[in-house]
Image: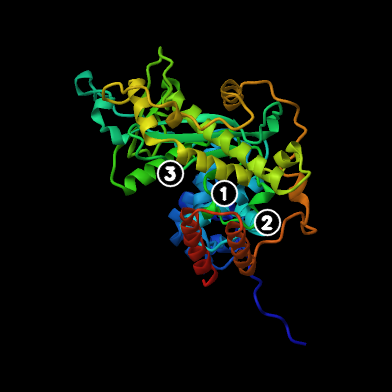
Amino acid sequence: MELNTKKKLHALSLAEKIQVLELLDESKMSQSEVARRFQVSQPQISRICKNKEKLLADWCSGTANHERKRKRESKYSGIDEALLCWYHIARAKAWDVTGPMLLHKAKELADIMGQDFVPSIGWLVRWKRRNNVGFGTRQVLVPVFPPEPPPAVLPSQAQPPLSLKDFSPEDVFGCAEVPLLYRAVPGRVFECDRLQVLLCANSRGTEKRRVFVGGLQPAPRCFFGVNSEALPASYHPHLAIPWPEWLAQFDQDMGQQGRQVALLLASGVVEEWASFPGLHHVRLLPLSASGTTPSLPSSVVLAFKAHYRHRLLSKLAAMQSGKEGTSLAEARASITVLDALHMVAAAWTKVPRQLILSSFVQEGLAPGKTPLSPDKDTEMSPVPSGLSQEEFSHFVDLEDEDPGPRVCKEETGTEDSGREEGGFEPLPTKADALRALCTLRRWLECNSTSPELFEKFYECEVEVEQLCCL
């Protein structure tokens, strides 16, 4: 009878490895004696000693799983680290971080890093185990080592505060959070239709930042199959704008351009974010605490909302005329968050540069003489048919009204028809795209289209055909 002399492998957890290091440091035991005590081989104890600094760093990080015996590195370590950094910021702000939020953020980070990666539930479970992440009671993460106090500065050495005069007008930015009821129609307003839109532009109107939108839906089903890079605006699955994330991206973009810029904010906001780490290219400048001047002029915000409302009403009218018998309520219900992102981006593009410039000058946020009042046609979108100027002005700025109950769903009505069993529309193929081009061209041919519109169609046709060849 043969005896199985193969020694069973005994791996030590991180907590046990720390005990090994403590025994070797505090007692006179040899590595062989410690190995016998923990029932492992002496070479394993030797490897623990060799990796002492790394093991202690993991132990003190507060994120390592102390019971984990082997640390297998993820294939996507960059995404791992970036997601963990975002998670720490979110928990420090006492946000409710959920699994779907982490999956959405991991995919977004992968797209930013240019990696072909689709996070799964299994990957998320392993990521949580690797980084000792668990969901439960809200808690504010406290650093393992308290930050060192800043060195004392004598009054004569204190740096003077920055002002607008220290920056060129092209490098002075203002921003505003704009609540938007994205499916509102005259007489019908619902709270669950609310989005939070962050607009940002420089005082010359020559540079508009990509629109940032926060919504109530953590993963709108209209986003199924959509590449996040193709979204016309950045989407965050929470109404509260994640300022740390947005400021970090703004600072990174300005660093890549080699610029130092100023961002105008309310004094209270500047005090809250003054200590935000990592801002090297964006300086936060507070507005007067006693004044009521917004950092992005209100006339700019109203112009944006007017263009959005006009585009929404035009879209609803086209949907009603395109399918006979479609009611306004049915057309409204078929507007999705993805539709809203496209209309938000289009409305922000339509806000004229001259309006932004004149508004900053009138508010005293940019140097220059106060310009003559611009033509109203350049400020506001034209009034849609069927509404008076007064009715449209009221419709543009209705977010402060008392909304109706939360009885609507994100996507209903006509959009639900033709879905697959899983609840999602089948993704369009290349053949579908080419057939759609033929249909659109035929429709233009039959409706006395101008040559200028055909030129735009030809440009679109070439781009689609090139994409189909990839």
Instruction: Look at mark 1 in the image and give the residue it sits on.
Output: 105
Q: Is residue 375 left or right of residue 321?
A: left
Q: Is residue 177 left or right of residue 423?
A: left
Where residue 112 appears, as percent x and y from the top left, is 48, 54
What's under tag 3, amino acid-wise? Gln
Query: Are there few (<14), some (14-19), or many (20+) residues within 10 Å of tag 2?
Result: few
What's under tag 2, amino acid-wise? Ile
| Secondary structure beneath label 3 | helix
Vertical comparison of 399 with 105: above or below: above
Query: Are there few (<14), some (14-19), or many (20+) residues within 10 Å of tag 1?
Result: many
Q: Quadrant of residue 438?
A: bottom right
Q: Quadrant of residue 293?
A: top left
Mark 1 vs mark 2, CA separation in Å: 13 Å
Where residue 223 appears, as percent x and y from the top left, is 63, 51
Q: Is residue 318 left or right of residue 365?
A: right
Q: Does residue 27 appear in the picture of this structure?
A: no
Q: Does residue 111 appear in the picture of this structure?
A: yes
User: Residue placed at 29% from the left, 38% from the top?
Assistant: 260
Where residue 37 appears, as percent x and y from the top left, is 60, 60
Q: Nearer the viewer, residue 120 or 49?
A: 120
Q: State which quarter of the image contains the N terminus.
A: bottom right
User: Residue placed at 70% from the left, 30% from the top?
Assistant: 190
Instruction: Look at mark 2 in the image and give the residue it sits on.
Output: 121
User: Between disc 3 and disc 2, whose residue precedes?
Assistant: 2
Vertical comparison of 29 with 175: above or below: below
Q: Which mark is residue 249?
A: 3
